[in-house]
Image: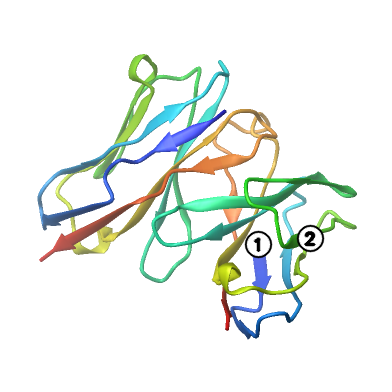
Amino acid sequence: AQKVTQAQTEISVVEKEDVTLDCVYETRDTTYYLFWYKQPPSGELVFLIRRNSFDEQNEISGRYSWNFQKSTSSFNFTITASQVVDSAVYFCALSEAPWGDMRFGAGTRLTVKP
Amino acid sequence: NAGVTQTPKFQVLKTGQSMTLQCAQDMNHEYMSWYRQDPGMGLRLIHYSVGAGITDQGEVPNGYNVSRSTTEDFPLRLLSAAPSQTSVYFCASRRDLTTGLTDTQYFGPGTRLTVL
């Protein structure tokens, strides 16, 4: 069965620090899809990135970067030079098949202090 | 495109009352689902549908019913509300993930439900 673990419940950093949010997943499928979502204090879910299991390329988008490692079943998210606006709950999610349901980790609450 | 819409945004019920949470999407997505979000537990899947007339249970289906008569709408019914159903409910929709390599699941704004 698919499972996503975000071991870090809460992280607090000072502005401009770099921070990495961990995500470890479990699946028996060879094809699967990984996602990161951001939930700011306003409550909506904002899509950040999708990674397919057959594409292990890491990705950088501005201050955000993602490290996908199949060997360790991890899909970690790094924010460089964090800002107060990055304060939110971040969710990692896994879908085992194109039509499969999406399972979420418990989320990591990131607080960036000025 | 309005995306995924949910009504109401807030609702307070008394134990035993019934109600329907509405969800609609205008993106012609086949797949729709309902999640509940509770503190420290992430989002848990309640029910999902892969097309009109087809529904199935997720992780936490007890106490909830769904139906899918059209591609656009996917209402969630609470038959007899209980305090344990106090939560934030999100509706979501998406296409088959093989359709587009960057496609994702889109969420509605959520409904905050309190059962007294």
Left or right, A15 with respect to A98, comes to: left
Q: Is residue A76 above or below residue B91?
A: above
What residue does disc 2 label?
A: B65
Number of labelled discs? 2
- Quadrant of the drawing holding the C terminus of chain B: bottom right
Labels 1 and 2 touching (C-beta < 8 A): no
Q: Tag 1, which chain? A: B
SS for dot 2: strand
Going 48% across and 58% down the picture, which residue do you hit? A45
Going 18% across and 58% down the picture, which residue do you hit? A83
Residue B2 seen in the figure = no
Left or right, A29 with respect to A25, comes to: right
Residue B50: give x, y in percent of width and height: 78, 42
- Quadrant of the drawing holding the N terminus of chain B: bottom right
Going 58% across and 19% down the picture, which residue do you hit? A29
Left or right, B109 with respect to A38, comes to: right
